[in-house]
Image (cartoon, grey):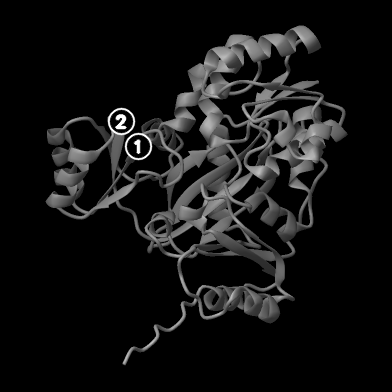
Amino acid sequence: MNVVFLSPHFPPSLYLFCARLRELGATVLGVADAPYESLRPELRKALTEYYRVPDLHDYDALVRALGHLTHRHGRLDRIDSLNEYWLETEARLRTDFNIPGLRVETIGRVKRKSAMKRVFERAGVPTARGRVVRTAPGARDFVAEVGYPVIAKPDVGVGAARTYRLENDDDLAAFLAGRARVDHILEEELTGELLSFDGLVDRRGEIVFSSSLVYGLPVLDAVRGADMWYWIDREIAPDLADVGSRLVHAFDVRERPFHFEFFRRPDGSLAALEVNVRQPGGLTVDMWNWANDIDFYRAWAEVVVTGTTTVRTERPYYCLWAGRKAGRSYRLDHEAVLGRYGPLLVHHERMDDVFAPAIGNYGYILRAPDLAPLAEAASEIQELAAPAWRE
């Protein structure tokens, strides 16, 4: 099996997906714009061939790269990056090279929030009212319909980038005056607990791994400056599993990880926020592994190569992320955190700057069979130092 992996070097942990593919006998063909010498040794070992393009945004260069790899290795069976940023590029290449998976004609429903809403509605899953707005009168009409506050975000976007909470007419006017010239969607604001239904789907469309994240605060609040903490739950509520499973089938997810976001509203009901056909960001895949004592990288590779996976889980642990942001003074310094919470810590590292606005510049991952000690640790890890008094 010939598998093309776009940008296999970033985010850094992606090399493990390539390594597991190689271990299972796949021919792994890397395409990126980084110098070959800059790739980590484990990645170079996993790749049968690496084709460097001047710029991954240069579609003609990517076509030439896949043409070269086809000439050298024969038919290309799969192409992936497991990266939200490159989903549309993958779809174009699959379409042009007749490779199975998401293609141009199907990518819109998992990239455009407005299209997602139509699928939610057909599947009978509640979601926030929303409308793509291109004019000021259209925006004001929508606000008149649902009332403030409203959330403004790009119809096609990643995470909480360029997402705003508009609380009054002045906020709306400022947004309309300064927004980029791309389609934006306005949504009524939903309140409640933010959580996800995540997992992996095999070639038949069956869920072979499932998990759930619970967020200590909304991602938008983290992007605005708050410290993010979230955890992997040991139990998945039956209604969340039911709605998530229905959406897997409604979006026809196959051979892919997925990350579906919801609000648990104050009345206990669920409302869908958005769908992502890739794994959650940051180090969540590693958290899945620590929470379940599994190798998710291998599970995905098995699905690609064999159609399903032998990896199974019983969810023996909670696993929690506590992030801290640069430029702040915390009550416990790094060494104090390690000394106090060493028995709970399974990992800690500095994050790449691209992830820092949402989850922090530095993160601590903790696990235990019970959530309470992890929540207490997160609170102390993120507690700010008391301001110094001045005479």
**Figure quadrant of the C terminus:** bottom left
Measured from the top left, where is residue 50 in percent x and y? 74, 23
First in residue order: circle 2 vs circle 1: 1
Relative to 155, 110 lies left or right? right
Residue at 52% over, 45% down: 260
What residue sits right under mark 1 in the picture?
154
Q: What is the quadrant of residue 301 in the picture?
A: top right
Q: Which mark is residue 99?
A: none
For label 2, the crowd category at 10 Å Cα-Cα, with few meaning under 14, some 14 to 19 and many 20 or more, is: some
Seen in the picture, residue 127 relative to 99 is either above or below; the reply is: below
Measured from the top left, where is residue 203 in percent x and y? 71, 29
Q: Nearer the viewer, residue 298 or 328?
A: 328
CB within 8 Å, label 2 to label 1: yes
Measured from the top left, where is residue 262 in percent x and y? 46, 51
Relative to 104, 75 lies left or right? right
**Figure quadrant of the N terminus:** top right
Q: Nearer the viewer, residue 200 or 16?
A: 16
Q: Is residue 379 visible?
A: yes
Q: Which mark is residue 183?
A: 2
**Amino acid on which disc 1 is placed:** Pro
Q: What is the quadrant of residue 60 in the picture?
A: top right
**Amino acid on which disc 2 is placed:** Asp
Seen in the picture, residue 309 relative to 371 is either above or below; the reply is: above
In terms of secondary structure, where does tag 2 sit?
loop
Residue at 49% over, 48% down: 261
Seen in the picture, residue 196 relative to 3 is either above or below; the reply is: below
In terms of secondary structure, where does tag 1 sit?
strand
